[in-house]
Amino acid sequence: MAVGKKRPGKDRCVIGKASKTSDTVIGGLVLHRDGYGFVVSADKCSEDLFVPARYIGDALHTDLVEAVAVPGRGGKMEGRIRSIVERRMKMLMGRLESHGRGFVVVADDRRVKHRVEVASNKLGGAKHGDNVVVAIKTYPGGERPMMGEVELVLGKRGDVSTEKSAVIFKHQLVRDFPAEVEKEASLARQEFLRLDGKYGDRVDLRSIPFITIDGESAKDFDDAVAVRSEADDAITLFVSIADVSHFVVQNGILDDEAYARSTSVYFPADCIPMLPEALSNDACSLKPNEDRFTLTAQIKIDTEGNILSADFYESVIKSVERMTYTSMKKILIEKDEEILERYKGLLGEFKVMEECFKRLRQNRLARGTIDFDLPEPEIIIDMKGEVSNIVRAERHVGHMMIEEFMIAANEAVARFLTDMKSPCIYRVHETPPEEKLKEFGILMHNLGYKFRIRKDMKPADLAKIAAAVRGKPQERLVNHMLLRSMSQAIYSDKNAGHFGLASGCYCHFTSPIRRYPDLVVHRLVKSVIGISRRKEDFRKRGGMKRSNLAEICEHCSRRERMAMEAEREMAKLHACLFMRDMIGDEYDGIISHVTKFGFFVELIDYFVEGLVHISAMDDDIYSYHEQGMKFVGKKSGKVFAIGDKVCIEVEDVDVPNREVSFILL
């Protein structure tokens, strides 16, 4: 199955803008498993519109809908879906069940309530109980059921390969590229190799010792960095980014496929790339000791971390080393003698890089950027492809250094395009909605923290909250809830700033191998500086039209959300696969979150979380105290609260539903 090649201007796709009447909104429908939903305004012209379950009608999760806003409970506006503008769900993944004389597919995604009826001659060899991908042929409408045909048989539920494939198809991801796309990528790579050192008027930076810094398993290297000390104590930072726009011609076959995918998706020991490997892992990847085309941001930074100047140009570099986060930690923190000896020729560069990093970070923290750490699981895969361990992913100076350099480059590019009055795809993170901040304020009060939540909260105010809980048992919960209280970062052709970074102007520029918006930003920068592989294309186009950018932003924001959901679910699947052989085993853990239906426990030995359901707490009758977020036994007075250490037994692992259950010991 190829990704649908829908381009801006070919579909009706006006998200979040009022229609003919001011109380009508067109937007993407996001359903909840309980049946209600929200019409999401992708460009944030208005807040997401809540739609009660009884007014969803025949609309499906992800559909583009038109909704009318009416006064609801408490004076808040509620939506009533008036019409379905575009059906976006083309495929559905689920369990095939015999039903009367025919069959139905029950969606694994609990947000899809409709069953898909499948005729006996449209099963494609599938049997009752199989996981299948079904192509939707007829959508529900009144008494008309949803009809479909089995497109692919994934296999038996619970099997590893079946469940991994299920995640991919559930989130509408496609692994394989069409043959013509692979061919185009291969031709682009061969054309680059034939240049044989004849690089035209690109700025030659091959004498500068660029390095890449990535994880051990990384294969696509978007960015390389270098530094230079200046006589006035300033530091010049070179951020050179893979020049993907040289290889991917706008509106060509490769571009259509990259746009349709919009983003690479990363799973444990696996990746579904945005571009074929001939480009993503080869011609565009900044491999050490190989000439590579880049677009460079050259930024001069003073002793206070302020940007004195920024310049942008096409370049050619030759990275001297492929560094990892671990090696940078051993050099800058652990001072490992063996590693220091190995990289002794670059130690001077690393020292200047560390100073540059400190300047930028200090400046960014001073302006109020929210610096909270949400730990992520690192899933270790062995040689057999099985999960051997799940640990808390490290975040140290190696990660933070490259992150700081990328933020500086992204801001510099966004300011440059804005100052030049050029269109731009901004990375927007708006001020948190007042209602969500109030809910967060209640949580903080329940946890015993006295923070005044105001309507005009600044990033620095929330940064203080993150700093106050650092290292405490409540840190993970507070950071998670703080993140949930904020608006979701999106792409937009209008600059609304980035609240979390306390940045007035921000974009994504540094990862064009894996993010389509970055590729577009590269084209916009080239358009402004007047350099292009095909200059006549820019003249004919007259720059990127803002209306097209708005549609690109909506599409890429939506695809990004789908990719993030897929990555989270795949991580949960791997956790279940890891724990399913441990049923009956006992472990120590820490209560990480408390809800009215039980509490979650994070294991000490492994970075895995499971639920102790209230029904499993049978040694007493426990009541949930929202004030303080804890359970209290009515007879014993025993308390279970966030941060408490408990001993649990693994009771059950539900692989298809991605759930791990514990019981208390």
Image: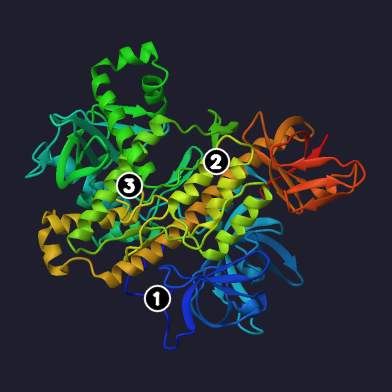
Residue 309, how many percent across, how many down?
17, 45
Q: Amino acid at mark 1?
A: Val
Image vertical order of residue 191 relative to residue 7, above or below: above
The residue beneath circle 1 is 14
The residue located at (37%, 75%) in the rendering is: 11
* Distance from the alpha carbon under mark 2 to that under mark 3: 33 Å
The residue beneath circle 2 is 468
Q: Nearer the viewer, residue 88 or 641?
A: 641
Q: Count residues near mark 2 (Cα–Cα under 10 Å), then give few for <14, some for 14-19, many for 20+.
A: few
Figure quadrant of residue 401: top left
Q: In screen coordinates, is 499 left or right of 590? A: left
* Distance from the alpha carbon under mark 1 to that under mark 3: 27 Å
Image vertical order of residue 55 relative to residue 312, above or below: below
Q: Nearer the viewer, residue 434 or 212?
A: 434
Figure quadrant of residue 57: bottom right
The residue located at (53%, 52%) in the rendering is: 483
Is the C terminus in the top left, top right, bottom left or bottom right quadrant? top right
Q: Earlier in the sequence, mark 1 or mark 2?
A: 1
Residue 254, how many percent across, how many down?
29, 56
Q: In screen coordinates, is 94 left or right of 212? A: right
Is the N terminus in the top left, top right, bottom left or bottom right quadrant? bottom left
Q: Amino acid at mark 2?
A: Ala
Image vertical order of residue 575 relative to residue 26, above or below: above
Q: Earlier in the sequence, mark 2 or mark 3?
A: 2
| Secondary-structure class at tag 3 | loop
Q: Count residues near mark 1 (Cα–Cα under 10 Å), then give few for <14, some for 14-19, many for 20+.
A: many
| Secondary-structure class at tag 1 | loop
Q: Earlier in the sequence, mark 1 or mark 3?
A: 1
Task: Say if mark 1 contacts mark 3, CB within 8 Å.
Answer: no
Task: Name the disc covering residue 511, or none.
Answer: 3
Residue 391, how many percent across, how many down?
57, 32
Q: Amino acid at mark 3?
A: Ser
